[in-house]
Image (cartoon, rainbow, N blue to C red):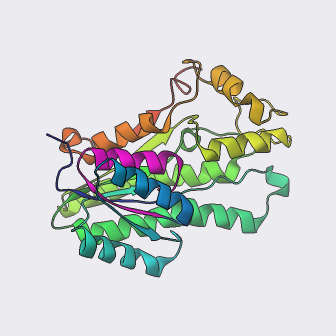
Amino acid sequence: MSLLNGRVAVVTGAGSGIGRATAEALAKEGAAVFATDIDEAGLKVTAGNITAAGGKVETLRQDVTDEAVWDTVMDMAAQKLGTPSILVNNAGIAIGGAIPEFSLADWKTQMSVNVDSVFLGTRAAIRKMMESGGSIINISSVAGLRGAAGLSAYCASKGAVRLFTKAAAVECGRAGWPIRVNSVHPGIIDTPIWQKSITQLGEGMPVNPDMPAGANAMDADVIAAQASPMGRAGRPDEVADLIVFLASDKSSYINGQELVVDGAMTAGG
């Protein structure tokens, strides 16, 4: 029996990387998936993969920073697939830059996409799930657990996601709403956002203390091998498998927690 039969999942940033892998993994376990992204071409690929595998999926272009659109997302998901019981706040961006030259505009953009969207999505999901119950999974990062040179805004945004998640879990529990809220903290995962970070490295910006300046896209595997004790970057599906677990009843007493998927990168000194 599949873990998520009869469940409805909303996944943001589902057009590529961890978001696509998550949407596909949830569908494989029986969930009907409402996938959103600003990347409509990527969404079509994700939807095609799910449909080809026999899954059920609907898509919508979504700017996750637009407050008004969140009600539309939840209402459309409910109308087309049923009341959502899973939300994966995955959409995010990484803007690198040294603090002395970092603009307030870039800071606000980073916070809007990575923090405001998580608040808006969580609020919308709680409103839908407070009676029927559900699981909210917020995608943070190992950068939300420790600092990284050249990524001050990104670290701040992902740290905010971590503590917002904990506060939301406590609030839901105290209010008697049957909703669990957890955060997932990937390390180096082979995704488009990782490749973009490598490009920034090639321009001389060290966006992670484990990565040397002057790297370029050809060094991605080498950098991952150096940073991770397991000697490689993680795969999106390895993060998605954890998200499926958190979405399921198998994790029914796991709430308000931060779960790290980084190949032991943060385990050492």
Residue closest to the eye, 62 or 249: 62
Q: Is residue 103 magenta?
A: no
Q: Is-magenta flag for residue 18?
A: yes
Question: Is residue 48 something that shows in the picture?
Answer: yes
How many labels, in total?
A: 0
Look at the image and tell me in which quarter the N terminus lies: top left
Against 215, is 53 above or below?
A: below
Q: Is residue 191 above or below residue 160?
A: above
Going by the picture, which residue comes out furthest to the front?
52
User: Residue 216: x, y in percent?
Assistant: 80, 35
Residue 10 percent location from the top left of the image = 35, 61
Q: Quadrant of the C terminus?
A: top right
Looking at the image, can residue 255 be seen?
no
- Residues shaded magenta: 14-36
Horizontal arrangement in the rendering, residue 151 relative to residue 190 (left or right): right
199 displayed left or right of 132 = right
The picture quadrant where one finds residue 132 is bottom left
The residue depicted at 62 percent of the width and 46 percent of the height is 192
| Residue at screen point 42% across, 55% down | 48
Q: Give the percent coordinates (x, y) of residue 219.
A: 75, 28
Residue under the point 58% across and 67% down: 112
Give the left or right position of residue 222, taking residue 75 as reference: right
Position in image of residue 227 (x %, y %): 64, 24
Pick the front one: 80 or 246: 80
Seen in the picture, residue 74 relative to 37 is either above or below; the reply is below
